[in-house]
Image (cartoon, rainbow, N blue to C red):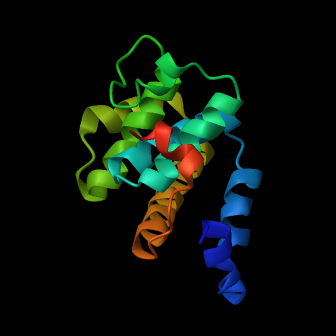
Amino acid sequence: MSTACAFAHSEALGGATYFEAVARLTTLSNELRLLIRLAVATANHCRYCTAHQRHQLAGLGVSEAKIGTIWQPDSDALTARERAAIRFAQAITLDASGIPELVYADFVREFTPQERVEVAIVATSMGMLNKLNDGLRVPLESEFEPLVT
């Protein structure tokens, strides 16, 4: 069962509609949004979402070298803005009430108030999607296995 199929069983809750709106309504670039989603999926160890974010980033032409730095946010492959978003996304995923001051200060410096809300919504929405996929045991398609092995 794919995530889309899982949502088909609860259309009234609008799961798929919600995630589509988060993607469509943000002012963040698609690449940044996907990097945030990848940071959260890897923090949550969600194989399904990690593979799909990696696939989408590759489809945008993002290099494997950049994708591979997701747990090395101080890498020169990332801009200061990307580093701030990724570090914040990982921190809010691991302990929302314990985000380190330096991580938060970098985040505030790089993003407007509206963008900060958008980054937080993208990150926490991805966390919810990770829980849905893992909790419902949504299997990873075989063609995506190489992206997480």
Q: Nearer the viewer, residue 139 or 69?
A: 139
Q: Is residue 112 visible?
A: no
- Name the residue rendered at 70%, 52% in the picture: 23
Q: Nearer the viewer, residue 78 or 138?
A: 138
Q: Tell me where residue 15 appears, x and y as whole percent.
A: 64, 75
Left or right: where does residue 11 sit relative to residue 81? right
Q: Which residue is situated farthest in the front direction here?
A: 142
Q: Nearer the viewer, residue 36 or 85?
A: 36
Left or right: where does residue 86 sit relative to residue 95? right
Q: Is residue 133 visible?
A: yes
- Name the residue rendered at 72%, 84% in the picture: 11
Q: Which residue is situated farthest in the right direction here?
A: 24
Q: Is residue 12 above or below residue 4?
A: below
- Name the residue rendered at 62%, 23% in the picture: 62
Left or right: where does residue 138 sit relative to residue 59? left
Say which quadrant the C terminus sits in.
Answer: top left
Quarter assignment of residue 86: top left
Q: Is residue 22 above or below residue 136?
A: above
Q: Nearer the viewer, residue 43 or 26?
A: 43
Q: Is residue 81 above or below residue 128?
A: above
- Name the residue rendered at 35%, 54% in the picture: 44
